[in-house]
Image: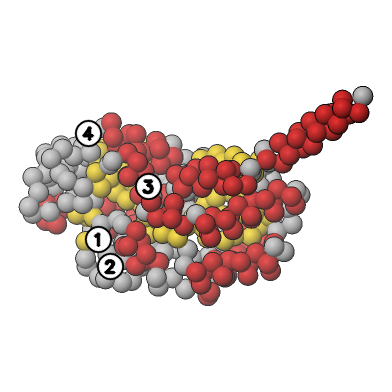
Amino acid sequence: MRLIVAVAAALIMLGGLSGARAQQITGAGSTFVYPILSKWSASYEQVSGARINYQSIGSGGGIAQIKAGTVTFGATDKPLAPDELAGAGLGQFPLIIGGIVPVVNLADIKPGDLHFTGPLLADIYLGKIKKWNDPAIKAVNPDLALPAADITVVHRSDGSGTTFNWVNYLSKVSTEWKTKVGEGTSVAWPVGVGGKGNEGVAQYVSRIKASIGYVEYAYVLQNKMNYAAVQNRAGKFIAPTAESFQAAASGAEWAKAPDFNLVMTDAAGAESYPITATVFILMYKKPKNAADAKAALDFFRWALDSGQAQAAELDYVPMPKDVVELIEKYWAAEFGR
């Protein structure tokens, strides 16, 4: 009898441990962050037992779900303004830095050989430039054999922080874009076809010949896509790399940005990639489930400390140490952690 009781007690204890190991942390939003978040999640489960259940639905969806209280955290590539955060009872902090990259489906042109200026990208997305051998494209690519093919423009169909950074950049470099289209997580696109998520845009561009789209750089690497270099404020054509993202991030003044409300597009610096972006995490300052919120912050603390090598493998840029210190102070002040 004692043996049976002991065995039963052991089984109950093991069941409790199994339940602890299987703790679910729910999040939703940015497709930009999905590649590295997936990698981090797998590694973190091995060391902690906690599982990250993340829905890659776009920044707009992530903002909506965290405001609805259906997830523990939201992820967005568009930072929310302090008044919007305060109204929703949310806090916000940056997690990782990467780049938004123009990608094309053009034969016989190597990755990085095609060059774009910001105004040129704006005119393509406005529908003003319709063919690849347009004189405006040839003017900045005199040595390339560009086809006389119609350009198929691909954009996001969902609410997207990737879109926000893309059109925020276009608004900074093109008065016509700013006036006619503007910026936001979704806009009224003048031309083109829409794909859902970075995944959808990558799939469309990979399938449609003579197309152009924009995706986060990790998707360029994963799908072996043909990317273009973009001219920065210093007049240099810069390829997307961890180094060029870091150059853009180096001048970011996070300490002066309330609730980390900072956008890095069109950054100064000779080596800066001009469409560099940040992923932000949204969480409630006074969550309904304190245990889940603590578990989520434990995961993000691990990611900022132990997940940096994995981030570099996908050409994301880790947050600098001084910014991580600012984030930890913010957690203590706003989340009590």
Residue highlighted by disc 1: 238
Q: Which amino acid does the dot numbered 4 rest on?
A: Lys
Q: Residues within 10 Å of mark 2 (few under 14, many from 20)?
A: many
Q: Which class describes the residues within 10 Å of circle 1: few (<14), some (14-19), or many (20+)?
A: many
Q: Are marks 2 and 4 in contact (CB under 8 Å)?
A: no
Residue 84 drawn at (x, y percent): 62, 59
Kindly identify which residue carries mark 4. 209
Kindly identify the residue that appears in the image at 15 percent across and 38 percent down: 107
The residues bearing labels 4 and 1 have C-alpha atoms spaced at a distance of: 24 Å
Q: Nearer the viewer, residue 337 or 289?
A: 337
**Along the polypeptide, which appears first: circle 1 or circle 2?**
1
Q: Position of residue 319 (x, y in %)?
A: 47, 63
State whether residue 87 is above or below residue 195: below
Circles 1 and 2, Cβ within 8 Å, touching? The answer is: yes
Circle 2 residue: 271
The percent coordinates of residue 325 (x first, y second) are 56, 70
Residue that carries the numbered disc 3 in the rendered image = 218
In the image, what residue occupies the spot 69% across and 62% down?
337
Marks 3/2: CA–CA distance: 20 Å
How far separated are the C-alphas under marks 3 and 4?
21 Å
